[in-house]
Amino acid sequence: MTKRMNVLMCSAAAVVMATGVAGCSNSDSEPSREEMAIAACRAEVGNKLKDPESAEYRNETAIESPASSDSNLWAVTGEVNAANSYGAKAGFAPFTCDASYGYDSGEMVAVARLSK
């Protein structure tokens, strides 16, 4: 491969990569109601932990309530692992959470339950 071809291929690859990164950015868009429900539930679960900053979450799912035709009610489940009073993590524990979208406030309100 000649030096000129190499430069052209590298330039083309850089343009494709920059376009792909720019095209994937959704920083201007609003979060979905599903994302809002998960975020509200994480915050509520965090309020129940000794060290919310240490929390790790996994296996989170948000399901819109069949009774809610307008993305107003969500059921969120997942697992959380966080440091206890001794600073040690005891392992992932399941949590459940109900989230409701307030049209007046534009925010999700959540109630979470941790399983021991």
Image (cartoon, grey):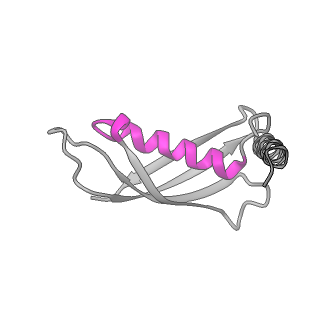
Q: Nearer the viewer, residue 9 or 53?
A: 9
The part of the chain drawn in magenta is: 32-54
Observer-nearest residue: 22 or 72?
22
User: What number of labels is visible?
Assistant: 0
Query: Between residues 21 and 82, which one lies in front from this camera angle?
Result: 21
Which quarter of the image is occupied by the C terminus? bottom left
53 horizontally vs 68: left or right:
left
Residue at the limit of the structure toward the front, as seen here: 2
Q: Identify the image quadrant of residue 21.
A: top right
> At which x and y percent is residue 9?
81, 49
Q: Position of residue 105 (x, y in %)?
A: 71, 31
Tell me, yes or no, whether the highlighted magenta stretch contains residue 93. Answer: no
Residue at x 14%, y 39% (from the top left corner) = 86
- Residue projecting furthest to the left: 86
Relative to 20, is 93 on the left or the right?
left
Q: Along the horizontal axis of the image, is 51 left or right of 68?
A: left
Quarter holding the N terminus is: bottom right
Q: Residue furthest bottom?
A: 66
Q: Position of residue 74 (x, y in %)?
A: 62, 56
Q: Tell me what residue is drawn at x 45 percent, y 49 percent.
A: 112
Is residue 41 in the magenta section? yes
- Chief SS of the magenta region: helix
Residue 30, quarter of the rendered image: top right
Residue located 19% across and 38% down the image: 87
* 95, above or below 13, in the image: below
Q: Which one is nearer the viewer's eye here, 63 or 5?
A: 5
Q: Residue at x 56, y 43 (%)?
A: 39
Asked if residue 61 lies left or right of residue 47, the reply is right
Can you say whether 21 is above or below 79 in the image?
above
